[in-house]
Amino acid sequence: MKLVPVSCLIVMPATTIVALTTTLRRHSMFCPILQRRIPSCHHRRRLVQFSTLSDSEIEVQPIEGSNAQRSKSPSAFDQKNKSRTRNPHPPPPDPTTFPPSSYDARSFFRFEILHESSKSMARVGRIHTPHGVIDTPGYVAVATNAALKGVDFRDVDTMAADGQQLHEGQQLVFCNTYHLLLQPGTEVVEGAGGLHTFMNRRDRPLITDSGGFQVFSLAYGSVHEELSTGGELKRASNKGRNRKTSHANGGDPSTSSAPPVRVTEEGAVFRSYRDGRKFLLTPESTVRAQKSFGADIIIPLDELPPYHIDPRVLADSVERTHRWEARSLKEHLRDVREQAMYCVVHGGLDRTLRKKSLDYLTSLPFDGYAIGGSLGKDGDELLELLEWMMPLLNENAGGSSVDRRSKPRHLLGIADEPSILGAVRNGIDTMDSCYPTRLARHGTLLTREGKIHIKSGRYSRQYGVPIDPECDCPTCRRYDRPYLWHLFKAKEPVFMTLATIHNIHYMNDLMARQRQLIFEDKI
């Protein structure tokens, strides 16, 4: 008994299969086995595929995601797919697969601890990079497109007086690889000699990310949007308007058009928001891009899952991130170029996954540790996570010779004042955020007495009063509240410049005061 040989994969609509099945069943009296071999197809508008098992028999299988019935007896095709489902990818590489020399201290990058508080985990230190020193704890300003919006770097990098003491202006600046890949592109920046020359910021350190956070933003919107929608995935409708479908918790995306981001083991595929070009961001390609940019500190590619996510999906995401970060590190070690690479510890709020991520990534030859992933829906969850996790960085994992305590720690994307104060107490050394500069553009100014919303008419007659009487930034030295109120209300572009200068200066002054309090063991 034989069936017609099939040696290729055929995909056709169910209506065609129904017609074929009906024809075969009419002749089943001549070959009764056909009735057992060909299942009925009652589901409309569903695709099925013929997959070859051998030259003498075929098996009807539904394409992944359909509900078409399968043959009850397991086939070799079924067993193969089940095996892939159980163990689809190998585990991340063992630390011993990295060259022993990669664990040696870097001559071009060094972190020194100057003082540790007797009251908390807070510490004062210095990070030495090829382009200058970073005092810690320190604020990292975000220059998304290699520029601070509305501000010349010279206005925030200069020395600033604070009473009788002098402290540095803005030291470390964060640039976004995703945006720089799209505009102006790696060739332009590399042709200029790297970001330091391109930006004319040759004597101050830079850090670039992998682009992973921007990929997350394409899929879910901002962190606020993801939290407010319960993890709904952004999707573009056929008319170009955004629709959302609950994908993070296992929702069926088949009713919507394709998501703006597709994540595979290889990397993340997305389209440029500028011209629609398709990009594949891989662990290797993002490292090569950051090599072209030439920042002092670079970040490996990671997957940033949303706050609302199925625990099993989160566990798979952490494993993928470990594989991606190990691939990024291996690419980096092929051509270090006097750049340091920080790992990114993931796991969301799941303490088991967080510890697993921390133990694995700190066992690899990274130069510093970044805390990333979902850090909670509010400041309370963030601080609760840090209070539990940061003491682990003062301990070495079992069997590891890596001294976790001796490496700098960076908190990704968090720099509102309450979170900063809590992070500093828990031993965070640097933290980046566009929060202070975004506040400035929208008329909110930071002071020692709290935030000022300059649009309020109450400030229109406070003549001679600067934004913050204790601040000595150029804005506070030259202008008072009524004039800034006027500029904001009149929508004068110079307001954004003056407000941003003040808020960045305030953040750096805040960190200088924190360092002094740590030296005095007051926090």
Image (tube, rainbow, N blue to C red):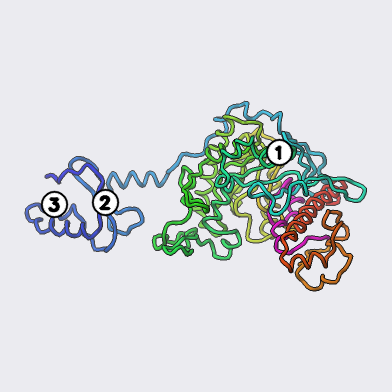
In the image, residue 447 lies in the stretch drawn in magenta: yes
Q: Is residue 237 left or right of residue 286?
A: left
Between 342 and 361, which is closer to the camera in this rendering?
Answer: 342
Which element is circle 1 on?
A: loop
> Mark 1 highlights which residue?
407
- Disc number lying in front (2 or 1): 2
Task: State yes or no: discs 2 and 3 in contact (Cβ < 8 Å).
Answer: no
Q: Is residue 53 left or right of residue 132?
A: left
Residue 398 visible somewhere in the drawing:
no
The crowd level at tag 2 (other Cα within 10 Å; few <14, some 14-19, many 20+) is some
Depth check, mark 2 against mark 3: the one in front is 2
Earlier residue among tags 2 and 1: 2
Q: Which residue is mark 3?
A: 33
Q: Quadrant of residue 375?
A: bottom right
Which comes before the other along the chain, label 2 or label 3?
2
In magenta, the rendered stretch is: 419-448
User: In front here: 301 or 5?
Assistant: 301
- How far apart, in angstroms, are the residues tagged by discs 3 and 1? 69 Å
Tell me which amino acid carries mark 3.
Answer: Ile
Q: Nearer the viewer, mark 3 or mark 1?
A: 1
**Amino acid type shown at disc 2:** Val
Query: Percent position (x, y) of residue 26?
Result: 10, 59
Q: Amino acid at mark 1?
A: Lys
